[in-house]
Image (spheres, rainbow, N blue to C red):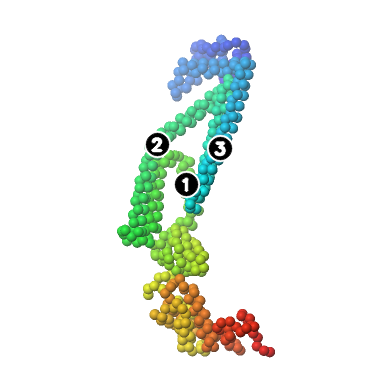
Amino acid sequence: MRADAAEANIQRVVDRAGRHRVTFRDNEQGTLVLLGNELVTLVTPDDLDILHGQTMAQARADIAQRLGTAVDASRQDRLPGNLVRGALWALGASLVMALSLALVLWFGARLRQRLRDRIARQTSRADSGALHHVMLTLRVIGDWLVRLLVVVAVLVVIEEWLRFVLGRFAFTRPWADAMTAWILGRLGEFGHAIAAAMPELVTAIVIFLIARLVARTVSVTFRGVQQGRFQLFGIDRELAEPTRKLAVAVVWLFAIAMAYPYLPGADTDAFKGLSVLVGLMVSLGASGIVGQAAGGFTIVYSRIMSVGDYVRSGEVEGTVQQLGLFATRLRTLTGVEVSIPNTVVLGSQLQNFSRNPDGPGVWLETGVTIGYDVPWRQVQRMLLDAAGNTDGIHPDPPPFVLQTALSDFYVEYLLRARIDDVLRRPLVLTQLHANIQDAFNGEGVQIMSPHYEADPQAPKLVPPQYREGMPPPGESPLVPSAAPG
């Protein structure tokens, strides 16, 4: 009620022509505020800001300054000349703003084009694909930085134009002053925050520099182990590189954990919430990645295979090209490069043909199942003859045959032979299978052992004309000619 009454009194006095001074008069209840010798309101001691120790004299000065400014602004707004002058200033400022925005946009476009041309020249001189990719990445980053600078410049121009226009009219001048005070306040807060964060930021930088020094020392040490200059804790050349990566990762993780409390804003709720969010995302989305990395370290440190070994993982058989942190790369004999996740390698059966206690080379194994009506000595002889006719099988130690099982319908025979070149294993095995078929067909022994009730009327053998070379002229190379009748 007092505020509404004071507003009505001020409006009544201001509507009258002339200049009106702000004066005060003391009475028993407090201080009377007069405007043009007419009562506006009463200020009592209970109205003072006791928490900040405000006195009646300070209240009078504050009231006189605020009320006098408001009355002068109201009077100035009523003068047609001031309104026209303010409108002209606002129009001129608008023209300057439009010109400034055009210059900022033109300069931004020119800067982006020059940046693109310079990076394009550097890219054309790049010798490697990696450097070419780096230059393209720099072009994208530079383009976005220029865009960001242009947006900031546009916002600054618009803010200054708005503040200037508001300041040309007495009624809106308090808004312009408030904008100025807000900007200065934000800049002051930024300056105080930067000054307060400098000691902790310097501490974090020192921690990262020490971590970088330790990481480089670890890298140099393990590269010396990898090159064979010295040994460290029994780590050989094969384990030097993965151990170096693991040690460097531990050093940087420890540095981040140590420097985290000293980072600016680390104690704010926003930073803590972001840390929790990132941790949750890593926990939910990186479980597979962590499993792959653990599998990679398991493969490396368990020494189940090395680069250059000829292995078989699941259905893939080839030479190990790389033991990565997340996957193992094999190159098959057909030249196809296959990448197998480390968890799949550990979860399946792995056969390493390059490692044999008998020395270089590998043992080949293949088998047949023959019925009980064929003498086992004849089967062994035919298998050994086929092995002897195969190129690449080493005579020392000589091949041998095992009878691995006496099943219900047949005997299982296993032929083992040794070769020197592990990379020729599929080719030698293919020739060995061909020689086995020729040997059994030559002596009329069927390589079939089904679950049957009676023998077939005709033996299941390859006709003689198809055992060696091509069939006679005029006959199909795939289907034998039908018997007459």
Quadrant containing the C terminus is: bottom right
Name the N-terminal-most of marks 1 and 2.
2
Q: Position of residue 217 (x, y in %)?
A: 34, 51
Q: Is residue 436 above or below residue 146?
A: below
- Judging depth in this view, the residue of 186 and 434 nearest the camera is 434
Residue designated by label 2: 198
Give left or right: position of 371 versus 422.
right
Name the N-terminal-most of marks 3 and 1.
3
Classify mark 2: residues with Cα within 10 Å, few (<14), some (14-19) or many (20+).
some
- Judging depth in this view, the residue of 110 and 142 nearest the camera is 110
Q: Is residue 420 above or below residue 91?
A: below
Q: Quadrant of residue 294?
A: bottom left
Name the N-terminal-most of marks 2 and 3.
3
Point out which mark residue 276 bears: 1
* Residue type beneath disc 1: Val
Residue designated by label 3: 110
Q: Name the front one of labels 2 and 3.
A: 3
* Residue type beneath disc 2: Met
Helix, strand or loop for disc 3: helix
Cα separation between marks 3 and 1:
42 Å
Residue at image coords 36%, 61%: 237
Residue at image coords 57%, 38%: 109
Classify mark 1: residues with Cα within 10 Å, few (<14), some (14-19) or many (20+).
few
* Residue type beneath disc 3: Arg
